[in-house]
Amino acid sequence: MLRIGEVMKTNIVTIDENGTIDEACTLMGENRIGSLVVTRDGKPVGIFTERDFLSKVVCAGADACKLKVSEYMSEPLITVNQRFTVREAARIMKDMKIKRLLVADGEEIVGIFTAADLVEVIAETPFDF
């Protein structure tokens, strides 16, 4: 069984909860990613995603230069252990209707597993549906 720890991405980009939506979007664009882990005093407290931006900021007609990420982030964080199988992670994502899982080792976030990672795993795994 393939484990999340074998396929997760370890480059996690963060933003402080007091960062602005504009700063968050700039970071996501520069890093070509769809989410940022939001931190408070260096500890993860939420996640800000493209969906949060579109459904909460754009739809509200809000000014992204002035708004704080903490007001629009998704919480609580959904985490798994790196020993979870890809299948277990996929079920959690399906059941919770989310596209990203943070991977934790104790209280430390060590990776992220996304729907794009799941597609990559499926594409590279030799089995038939």
Image: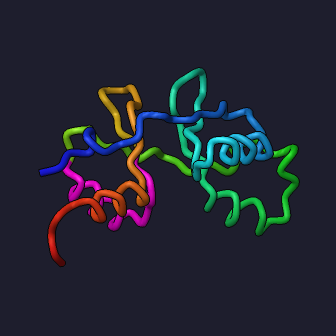
Instruction: Locate residue 103 relative to residue 51 in the image: left or right.
Output: left
Q: How is the image coloured?
A: rainbow
Q: Nearer the viewer, residue 51 or 107?
A: 51
Q: Quadrant of residue 89?
A: bottom left
Question: Percent x, y for residue 50?
Answer: 63, 57
Q: Residue furthest bottom?
A: 129
Q: Which residues are magenta?
A: 85-101
Name the spot of residue 7 as percent of width and height, x first.
Answer: 30, 45
Q: Residue at x 39, y 36 (%)?
A: 111
Where residue 75 appears, as percent x and y from the top left, is: 52, 48
Q: Position of residue 119 (x, y in %)?
A: 36, 63
- In the rendered image, residue 11 lying in the magenta stretch gets the answer no
Q: Which secondary structure class fits the magenta region best?
A: helix
Residue 100 belongs to magenta span: yes
Q: In terms of image quadrants, where is residue 91? A: bottom left
Kindly indicate the quadrant of the structure image that contains residue 66: top right
Left or right, 76 with reference to 83: right
> Which residue does the image show at 88% across and 53% down from the upper left?
63
User: Does 57 appear above or below 15?
Assistant: below
